[in-house]
Image (cartoon, helix red, strand yellow):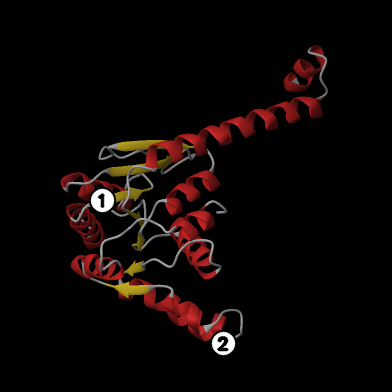
Amino acid sequence: MKEKASAMLSGLTVDDALMTRESERIFQIMTEFAEGFERLSTIRPSVTVFGSSRTSPDHPWYKAAERTSRLLSEEGFSIISGGGPGLMEAANKGAKAGSASSVGLNIQLPREQIPNTYQDVALHFRHFFARKVMFVKYASAYVVFPGGLGTLDELAEILTLVQTGKTPRIPVILMGTAFWSGLVDWLENSMVAAGNADSSDLTLFSILDEPKDVVDAILAHYPDRDFTPSQEERERLLDL
């Protein structure tokens, strides 16, 4: 009632007031994209690391994420995470211990998302879709540790973008055979078997268990260490 009265006093209907707020939101979204493009365009090469916000520092996955990110950082890869606790913190912590930049793409959430303290570059988003573009646009590889629905969402989006040619074919590495094998079995025995995906789609990613193997796989994909997207790839990334 208070919002309705305020809108009427200002000469606007409730619908007009909502439309004004929607218009203002467009500029907010533009600002998130502009700041992301400006601050992340200089961090190449980079690897985006996903994983659960709920994993404690004494868990083997946390230690593996920290170790993997440190090895990648020492090879010159900036590390991009979601900026929160758990495996995101482990990724930023490992990156900060190395020689490259540690980047956090933080998101405002009602719970769970508390920015970690290991970020050299910290961006803050209200909108998931703007944040997702930043995860993808400047990455030379993706490393996906065990996680929950958010991690699964990010993995599905990445695989879809690669499958449809919206992004270049780059390494997508799932860390933890024991964790991911059930999903892979379901993809093969249910999704592919039903004709809803091709068997070749299962080659869009690999599953590894050791941090050093992750580094070796990414470097093997770039034998000449040229991480700069081609002109054709740049054009595709403009249409994310």
Q: Position of residue 47 (x, y in %)?
A: 32, 55
Is residue 123 visible in this depiction of the protein? yes
Secondary structure at badge 2 equals loop
Residue type, numbered disc 2: Ala
The residue at the point 26 percent across, 53 percent down is 77
Left or right of 218: which side holds 188? Answer: right
Q: In the rendered image, which residue does mark 2 sit on?
A: 193
Residue type, numbered disc 1: Ala
Q: In the rendered image, which residue does mark 1 sit on?
A: 90
Q: Which is nearer the N-term, disc 2 or disc 1?
A: 1
Q: Is residue 165 above or below residue 65?
A: below
Is residue 149 visible in this depiction of the protein? no
Secondary structure at badge 1 equals helix
191 or 135, which is in the foreground? 135
| CB contact under 8 Å: marks 2 and 1 | no
Q: Position of residue 66 (x, y in %)?
A: 22, 54
Q: Which part of the image, by quadrant, shows the N terminus? A: top right
Q: Is residue 92 above or below residue 159?
A: above
Left or right of 117: which side holds 52? Answer: right
Left or right of 30: which side holds 174? Answer: left
